[in-house]
Amino acid sequence: MKKNLFKIAILIATIATSFPAIAQQKTGFHVLKDLPIGSSGGWDYILVDGANKRIYTSHGNQVNVLSTVNGDSIGYIPKTMGVHGIALVNSLDKGYVSNGRANSVSVFDIKTLKVLAEIPVGTNPDAIFYDDFSKKIITCNGRSKDATIVDPVADKVVATVPLGDKPETAVSDGKGKVFVNGEGTSTVIVFDATSYKEITRYKIDGGESPSGLAIDRTTNRLFIGCGDSKTMVIMDAADGKTIAKFPIGGTDGVVFDPGLKIAYASNGEGTISAIRELNANKFEFVENITTEPSARTIGIDLTTHKLYLPAAKTEPNPAGGRPKQIPGTFHVIEVGK
């Protein structure tokens, strides 16, 4: 009997000490505060420059720039018609904004936020990013179904890559390959970052209408947020094989934190789905972090590990379709520990 009691005591102790370990697996993230922006207007992408403590958020026909330190307004970049995304080339002190309605990219001075030039690109440029391998700015053009390659030194278009599908988001592996989400065919399109030639295409297994996309360059894994199927598909960037799939929400944005080894998908229902990478072939669902409805895109500060999401209060649209934004409620949500 004493032996049995001793075994039970050990079992209870083991279970008790296991619970804190399990609890530590959660992110501990929650909404820290809201950063208000008084004017009205729609939004899309948000970019966080942790090194320079700035947040760039698309908003109507301008880009609002906030401080990550206190949330104060630093200024704004005007006349970015139908703005979608923002990219930075800090070594040149220049930034780039994709103007969906103007079919152009605005070039601005990072220090003054003054617009320096406007570059014609494809039709309805959406996502935009700086590829640190080729040292080029790349835009995903929704209606012309191609990608525009811009040399940020000369601020000139040097190539156009036909994609044959509506491109949503693109990332680089830092070694010469660019990966693009093809929304219409649920395909990842891969092209060479220097020759601008298509290399291959990967059909996304179990995911439809891919939007958000991130990459772990160390393990060569793609994190694909598929909005229609509400799925995150984790893919081997080398051969397109599916490594894992997780149910999430109606996402429009995905970021990856290489320090914490966590991918985050922002869901319009009002959550962030967190997926942890245990190793290159093993992943686990961590939790859904509560934000608020309409917070569907996401940016990450890699210096502080905080997340930022643009959002606004909405009300039903009498004409149907997408809910109407309540004037004066646009803000950026800060999420962290």
Image (cartoon, helix red, strand yellow):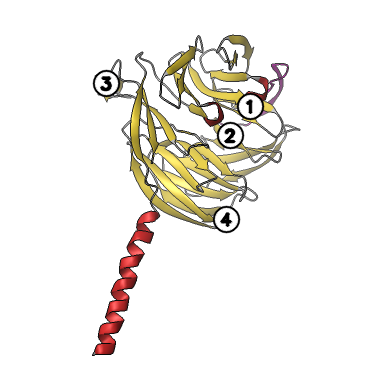
Q: Position of residue 34 (x, y in %)?
A: 34, 27
Q: Which residue is mark 4?
A: 280
- The N terminus is located in which quarter? bottom left
Could you say which disc has been placed on residue 317 in the image? 3
Which mark lies nearer to you, 3 or 2?
2
Q: Which residue is mark 1?
A: 138
Of the image marks 3 and 1, the number of the one nearer the N terminus: 1
Of the image marks 1 and 2, the number of the one nearer the N terminus: 1
Which mark lies nearer to you, 4 or 2?
4
- Would residue 154 be counted in the magenta stretch? yes
Picture quadrant of residue 317: top left
**Gap between marks 3 and 2, in whole Å?**
32 Å
* Mark 1 surroundings within 10 Å by alpha-carbon count, few (fewer than 14), some (14 through 19), many (20 or more): many
Answer whether labels 1 and 4 touch (C-beta < 8 Å). Answer: no
The amino acid marked with disc number 1 is: Ile
**Can residue 229 be seen by looking at this rendering?**
yes
Q: Give the magenta-colored segment's residue range.
A: 150-165
Q: Is residue 66 left or right of residue 129?
A: left
* Mark 2 surroundings within 10 Å by alpha-carbon count, few (fewer than 14), some (14 through 19), many (20 or more): many
Asked which secondary structure carries label 2, the reply is strand
Q: Is residue 212 left or right of residue 110?
A: left
**Gap between marks 4 and 2, in whole Å?**
21 Å
* Mark 3 surroundings within 10 Å by alpha-carbon count, few (fewer than 14), some (14 through 19), many (20 or more): few
The amino acid marked with disc number 3 is: Asn
**Gap between marks 3 and 1, in whole Å?**
35 Å
| Whether residue 334 is situated above or below residue 60 in the rendered picture | below
Q: Which residue is mark 2?
A: 170
The amino acid marked with disc number 2 is: Ala
Answer whether labels 1 and 2 touch (C-beta < 8 Å). Answer: yes
Question: Which one is nearer the viewer's eye here, 237 or 274?
Answer: 274
**Gap between marks 1 and 4, in whole Å?**
28 Å
| Whether residue 308 is situated above or below residue 96 in the rendered picture | below
